[in-house]
Image (spheres, grey):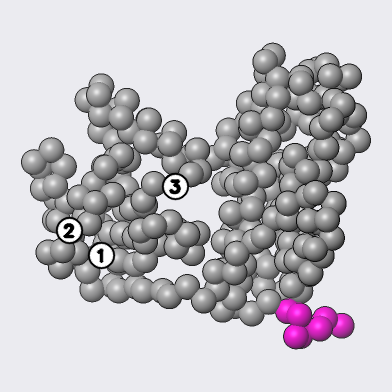
C-alpha cells in the first residue's frame, strides 16, 4: 500500500517535473561536453558505441546525439507520474525516454575505466533526487558537489483567454483577436525575466504555427542553437518561426527580449 503522505499531489507535480527537467538538461549538457577518448583511454570509440549507441560518439570523441530530439523523448506529462510516490518519480522521469535512459547510460558508463585522476561520479554529478539532500554534508566532506533540484511548485501562475495581439514582422502586421496569454513554465522562472506563452485560438495561424514562446536568454545551449538558426534563416530571407530579439508590448508597456 502506498504512503499517501509521500505521494505527489497534482498541484506540486509540475514544479517537480520542471526541477527534474533542469537536472536532466544539466546531465545531457555534461554528456555532450565529455570527450570519451580522453575520459576512457582504455576503450576505443567502436567499443563505447557498441554499449552506448544512443550517444552516437564521433571520431573526435564527443557525443553526437541531438539534444532537442533527446529532450522531446522524456515524458513531461504530470498525469504520467500522478500515481508515483515522491521517492519514485525521479527514477521514472530519468527512465521515461526508452531510447535515452539516463540512469542506464550512467550505469553503463560506470563500468568503464576512466583515465587516472578522473572521478566519473563527480564529473557527471550523478545525484538525481531530493532524497539525497539530507546527505549533502557527507557529499561535501567527500569532495563531491551535490546537485540540488529547485522546488518551483510555489511560483505564481497567470493565464488569460481574453488577450488580443498585434504582431509586426518587417512592417507587416498580423492581428489576432482570440489569444490565450500566460506566464511561461516554471523552468523559465529561473531566468531574470519571466517567460510568456502565446496560443492563437480558432482557425488563425502565423507562419503555420499557433503557439509561441517568448523567453529571455538562458544558459541552455539549445537556446543558442535556436538563435543561430533564426539568424541564418533571416539572413537568407527565409520565413522563420524563431527570432533572436523581439520588442514585446503589454498594455503599451515595453519589454525587450
Specify few, some or many for label 2: CA neighbours under 10 Å numbering under 14, 14-19, or 20 or more.
Answer: few
Could you tell me residue 22's position as x and y percent? 59, 54
Q: Which residue is mark 2?
A: 254
Instruction: Please tell me which residue is depicted at 75% across the width and 24% down the height of the picture.
Output: 36
The residues tagged by marks 2 and 1 sit, at their Cα atoms, a distance apart of: 19 Å
- For mark 1, what is the residue? 179
SS at mark 1 in the image: strand
Specify the quadrant that holds the N terminus: bottom right
Q: Quadrant of residue 10?
A: bottom right
Q: Decide: is 39 above or below 245.
A: above
* Closer to us: 46 or 30: 30
The answer for how far apart the CA atoms under marks 3 and 1 are is 26 Å
Q: Nearer the viewer, mark 2 or mark 1?
A: 2
For marks 2 and 3, give the CA distance.
Answer: 20 Å
Judge by depth and name the residue closer to the eye, 193 or 95. Answer: 193
Q: Going from the N terminus, do you reach mark 2 or mark 1 first?
A: 1
Foreground of the two, 38 or 205: 38
SS for dot 2: strand
Residue 208 percent across, percent down from the top left: 30, 44
Amino acid at each position: 500500500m502506498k504512503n499517501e503522505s509521500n505521494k505527489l499531489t497534482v498541484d506540486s507535480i509540475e514544479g517537480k517535473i520542471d526541477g527534474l527537467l533542469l537536472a536532466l538538461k544539466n546531465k545531457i549538457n555534461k554528456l555532450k561536453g565529455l570527450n570519451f577518448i580522453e575520459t576512457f583511454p582504455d576503450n576505443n570509440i567502436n567499443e563505447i558505441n557498441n554499449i552506448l549507441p544512443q550517444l552516437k560518439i564521433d571520431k573526435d570523441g564527443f557525443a553526437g546525439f541531438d539534444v532537442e530530439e533527446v529532450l522531446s523523448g522524456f515524458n513531461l506529462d504530470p498525469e504520467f507520474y500522478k500515481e508515483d510516490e515522491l521517492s519514485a518519480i525521479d527514477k521514472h522521469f530519468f527512465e521515461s525516454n526508452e531510447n535515452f535512459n539516463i540512469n542506464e547510460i550512467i550505469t553503463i558508463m560506470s563500468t568503464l575505466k576512466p583515465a587516472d585522476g578522473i572521478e566519473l561520479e563527480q564529473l557527471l554529478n550523478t545525484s538525481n533526487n531530493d532524497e539525497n539532500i539530507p546527505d549533502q554534508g557527507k557529499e561535501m566532506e567527500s569532495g563531491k558537489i551535490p546537485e540540488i533540484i529547485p522546488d518551483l511548485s510555489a511560483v505564481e501562475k497567470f493565464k488569460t483567454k481574453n488577450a488580443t495581439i498585434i504582431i509586426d514582422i518587417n512592417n507587416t502586421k498580423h492581428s489576432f483577436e482570440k489569444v490565450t496569454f500566460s506566464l511561461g513554465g516554471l523552468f523559465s522562472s529561473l531566468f531574470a525575466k519571466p517567460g510568456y506563452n502565446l496560443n492563437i485560438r480558432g482557425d488563425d495561424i502565423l507562419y503555420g504555427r499557433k503557439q509561441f514562446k517568448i523567453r529571455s536568454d538562458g544558459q541552455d545551449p539549445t537556446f543558442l542553437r535556436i538563435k543561430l538558426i533564426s539568424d541564418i534563416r533571416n539572413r537568407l530571407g527565409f520565413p522563420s518561426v524563431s527570432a533572436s530579439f523581439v520588442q514585446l508590448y503589454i498594455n503599451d508597456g515595453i519589454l525587450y527580449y
